């Protein structure tokens, strides 16, 4: 039969699972992130159990997800980026958020960083000025030697 040769009767799932199937799967197991500085998109894809094109799409939709690129153009995700990817996946697939809703939730969660920034700015700026001057003198010394 032509139908079976084309794979139309194959038991392989196609597309997204139904709501009932998603609810049956339950929440994803806790993912342990290896102790590395940078992860390539394939590694992040495996950790998050998503396709790499999904990660590239999420980069366009979530401004807080900004992997750096190597000299060869390879995306390099930091540990924080991997954690963000896992949180995005949890919000979208487990909690049922829309992309816009997940974006708002993530930005709401990052508001705590602004509070810490305010505390840091309220601190005495004198030590920071000293550190800045020291770093500038080191930079001057290094630029003379090169």
Image (cartoon, grey):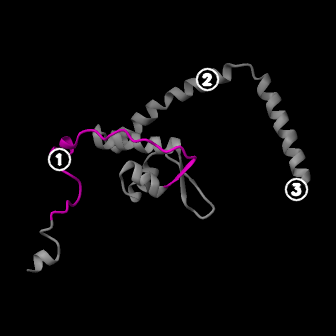
Contact, CB < 8 Å: mark 1 with mark 3? no
Whichever of labels 1 and 3 marks the residue nearer the N terminus, that label is: 1
Residue 146 marker: 3
Q: Comparing marks 2 and 1, which lies closer to the viewer?
A: 1
Residue 21 marker: 1
**In the displayed structure, would residue 41 be above or below residue 33?**
below
Q: Secondary structure at mark 1?
A: helix
Q: Crowdedness of circle 1 by 10 Å Cα count: few (<14), some, many (20+)? A: few
Whole-Å distance between the Cαs marked 2 and 3? Answer: 38 Å
- Magenta-colored span: 11-40
Whichever of labels 2 and 1 marks the residue nearer the N terminus, that label is: 1
Residue 42, picture quadrant: bottom left
Q: Nearer the viewer, residue 51 or 128?
A: 51
111 left or right, relative to 53 = right
Residue 131, picture quadrant: top right
From the top left corner, tell me how far across and down residue 126 is, in percent.
79, 22
Does the stretch in magenta take in 54? no
The residue identified by callout 2 is: 118
Whichever of labels 2 and 3 marks the residue nearer the N terminus, that label is: 2
At x 53% / y 48%, what residue is drawn? Answer: 66
45 left or right, relative to 21 = right
């Amino acid at each position: 039969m032509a139908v079976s040769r084309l794979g139309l009767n194959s038991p392989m799932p196609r597309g997204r699972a139904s709501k009932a199937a998603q609810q049956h799967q339950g929440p994803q197991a806790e993912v342990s992130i290896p102790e590395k500085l940078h992860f390539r998109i394939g590694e992040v894809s495996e950790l998050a159990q998503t396709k790499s094109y999904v990660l590239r799409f999420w980069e366009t939709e979530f401004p807080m997800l900004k992997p750096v690129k190597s000299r060869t153009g390879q995306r390099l995700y930091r540990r924080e980026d991997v954690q963000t990817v896992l949180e995005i996946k949890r919000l979208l697939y487990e909690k049922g958020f829309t992309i816009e809703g997940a974006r708002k939730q993530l930005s709401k969660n990052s508001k705590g960083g602004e509070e810490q920034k305010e505390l840091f700015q309220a601190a005495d700026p004198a030590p920071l000025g000293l550190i800045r001057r020291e770093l500038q003198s080191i930079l001057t010394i290094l630029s003379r030697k090169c």
